Structure formats: structure tokens, C-alpha cells
Image (cartoon, rainbow, N blue to C red):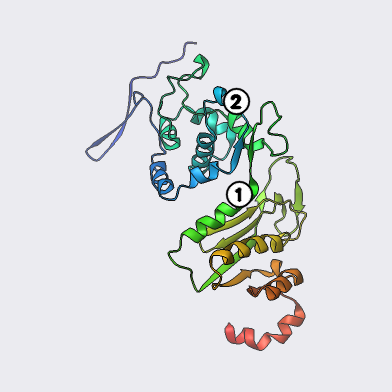
Amino acid sequence: MNTECKPEQLEFQSLGRREVMGRFDGGRITSDGGGLLLREVDRHIGLLDRLAACFTDHRNPESIEHSVRDLVAQRVYGLALGYEDLNDHDDLRKDSTLALLVGKRDLTGERRVREQDRGNPLAASSTLNRLELGTPESASSDRYKRIAADNEAMDRLLVDLFLESYRKPPRKIWLDLDATDDPLHGQQEGRFFHGYYRCYCYLPLYIFSGEHLLCARLRTADKDASSGSVDELQRIVGQIRARWPKTRIIIRADSGFCRDAIMAWCETNDVGYVLGLARNKRLQRALGKEMEEAR
């Protein structure tokens, strides 16, 4: 049976005096125009240029169509616009608005070197995959994954952006530590069941100051919630104090971070702390009167 061809225009029930119709002659259109606001923010703080500088590119310069900065920008804007998966970019590589955000001059991809790539101004998932999977140890000799990230430089960049957001050093700042579940839905590497969250997940560590992210560390769920916190605090507090030596620093976290190692480190390094205590019968008896007054 022959399929019915789509008409040039679909007409729907009107809305008051307004006609409602569907047409298919829009050409290159997008629903991601809000990304232009993100580009203005990036022009102000220079995030993408600085993030791209945290990568080392071992590719042959004569064979490059997409610079590291272009690849980083494409991936970051994609994530910000809600496209989490790399394979999303097999369609997004055609998006002229995303190409504009990235900074491509050929917004339609008509001047690409290879004929099979023409019409696609951006990189496909296979190219972005090489960006994400390259390692400093193997990038210089690997056949495909020849771009490597400097993780320490990216860690410093997050804290630098936080420091630069202040015109003058504050008298006091709070650092909030948190561990939360990142649920898994397949047989991913490092998959463990977490009893508290009752699912298979990763257990990333986050450190914020207000709305500023200072640390995001991916961890498997077979670790304590506080695992690695002292190392991250030592790094972050040291970087902050190098710029703001007189600023009072206080950490804040729930009972999952109420550990001797963290409290001992804070007391040794003159860092205040407000940590939750896990509820237990003895503590409830001791604080019964105060808890009733608070209630």
C-alpha cells in the first residue's frame, strides 16, 4: 500500500481568532536559542578558552578541522542545553545555532574538507569521544585518542572562577560538602549497590560555596560518603588562602562527613566546621529537652 504524502500545511482547530497550523518549510530551525545567553556569559568570564587551555593536543595540526577549543565548547554547550549523551551530537552536528555558539564561521558546514561531512559544521560523536577518553599517559602515542586533559588544571580553574567572582575578599565563606547518588541503569564499570539510596549508582563528591561549584569528583558507591574529602579540602582551602589569607573558612555537611579525620584536619588548619550527627538513642536522650524546645 502506498504511503500518503504529507501536505505542505496542516491546519488545526483555531485558538480564538488565531489560526493554528503546521508547516514543514522552516529550513534550519532550532529550539536552543537560549544558548546565545550562555555565549554572552562565556565572553565575559572566558570559561571555554580557559577550559580548553587545560588540554594538550597531540594531533597533526595539518589534519585538524575541529580545534580543542571547538570540541570543548561543543560538548559544554550541549550539556548546558540538556544533551547529555555523546551520540546526541550525531544530530546536533548539523545545528547551525550550536555552530554559532561554538564559534564556527561556516555555520552550514558547506566548506568542510570531506564531501561526506558537508552540511555538518560540527564534530560527530566519534570525534568528541576521542576528546573525552584520551589520557596524559597514552595520548602522545595513541592512534586516535590524542587529546589529554590536565585534571589538576581543571580543578584549579573551578576555584579560580569562584575567587574571581568577588571584587574583594569576603570576611567569611562556607564550603558545603555533599555526596549524592548518580543512578546507573546498565552494567557500567564500577557499578555497586548502595544501601542508603537503594539502587545501583555512583557516589560523586561535591563541594560548593554558595552557587559556585569548587569540586566534582566521581566515585564508586562502595566508598564512605566522606572518602577523599580531606584531600579535596586541603587543595581548595590552600588555593583560597593563597588569595584570601584573612578570610574565615567554615565547612558544613551532614552526618556522612562527621568523621575524625575531617574534624582533626579542620582543627589543625584553623577551619571551622558544622557537621551533622547521626541520630541514635543515647543522643536523643541527652538532647531530648533541647529538641522539644526547638520543636
Residue 44 in percent (x, y) is at: 40, 49
**What is the tally of numbered marks visible in this picture?**
2
Q: Quadrant of residue 209?
A: bottom right
Task: Identify the image quadrant of the C terminus.
Answer: bottom right
Residue behind mark 2 = 60
Q: Residue at x 70, y 60 (%)?
A: 231
**Do the residues under discs 1 and 2 have CB atoms within 8 angstroms?**
no
Question: Quick one: label 2, few (<14), some, or many (20+) residues within 10 Å?
Answer: few
Closer to the chain start, of discs 1 and 2, is 2
Residue occupying the far left of the picture:
17
- Rendered image quadrant of residue 230: bottom right
Q: Looking at this view, is 83 or 77 the one in front? A: 77
Left/right placement of residue 52 relative to residue 258 reads: left
Q: Position of residue 241 (x, y in %)?
A: 58, 67
Q: Residue at x 24, y 37 (%)?
A: 18
Q: Which residue is mark 1?
A: 153
